Image (cartoon, rainbow, N blue to C red):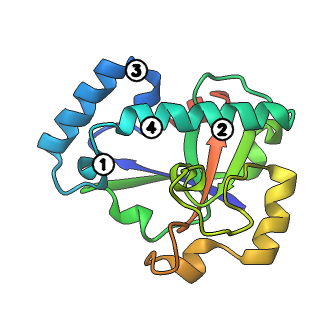
Amino acid sequence: MTLYHYFDKRGRPFQTLSDLPVEEAKGLLAAVKEMRPRSQCAGRHDKYVEYRHNCEDILRREFEKKGGLILWHSPHYMVVEHSPWLSTWYEECGVVQIPIEEFDLRTLSFTYGDSMPTFSPTVNDGKAYRHQLYTYEEIGTVIKRYGLPQDWNDDGQKGPERYIEVHVWSDETINRYR
């Protein structure tokens, strides 16, 4: 299994708004909207930073319940295997690929689909993987059952899941790829 991280080449990989104070993150998001209007990030709503922090609180709590190892306050985001859709998010897209064997698997959590709709109170379609966070051991079973979302829903016509999101709760491996 290979994990992918997409980013704008005019910046650096593994930069996250979650590492910034809320007002600073909002200012950066406003600058992105102005400087990179064709990027996916430019379309984010005004409450995105607050929603992201709320979602990360849920991820953290759920991962703690499962005994996950949290060594960094907010996760670094990656996906399982290549996502054609995510590769279109940036005007000048770069990608980092890291074999999963390079990570301490105890620091990885997963959602089947993006974590925001996965834990959104407005997405109530009854799918078994909704409102669920998985460990590395658990996500393999989910993939065997449902496959990779990018293989059956890359266009988003069948719901919000287009990839499997990975939350990396450590800087150790990430720092080698910055």
Q: Earlier in the sequence, mark 3 or mark 2?
A: 3
In the image, what residue type sits under mark 3? Leu
**SS for tag 1?**
helix
Of the two numbered discs 1 and 4 in the rendering, the one whose residue sits closer to the viewer? 4
Q: Residue at x 12, y 41 (%)?
A: 34
88 horizontally vs 151: left or right: left
Of the two numbered discs 3 and 2 in the rendering, the one whose residue sits closer to the viewer? 2
- Mark 4, residue position: 51
Image coordinates of residue 57 in percent, x first then y, are: 61, 30
Of the two numbered discs 4 and 2 in the rendering, the one whose residue sits closer to the viewer? 4
Spatial CA span between label 3 and label 1 = 16 Å
- Mark 1, residue position: 41
Image coordinates of residue 45 in percent, x first then y, are: 28, 45
Of the two numbered discs 3 and 4 in the rendering, the one whose residue sits closer to the viewer? 4
Q: Residues within 10 Å of mark 1 (few under 14, many from 20)?
A: some
- Mark 2, residue position: 59
Image coordinates of residue 165 in percent, x first then y, are: 60, 54
Q: Residues within 10 Å of mark 3 (few under 14, many from 20)?
A: few
Q: Is residue 16 visible?
A: no
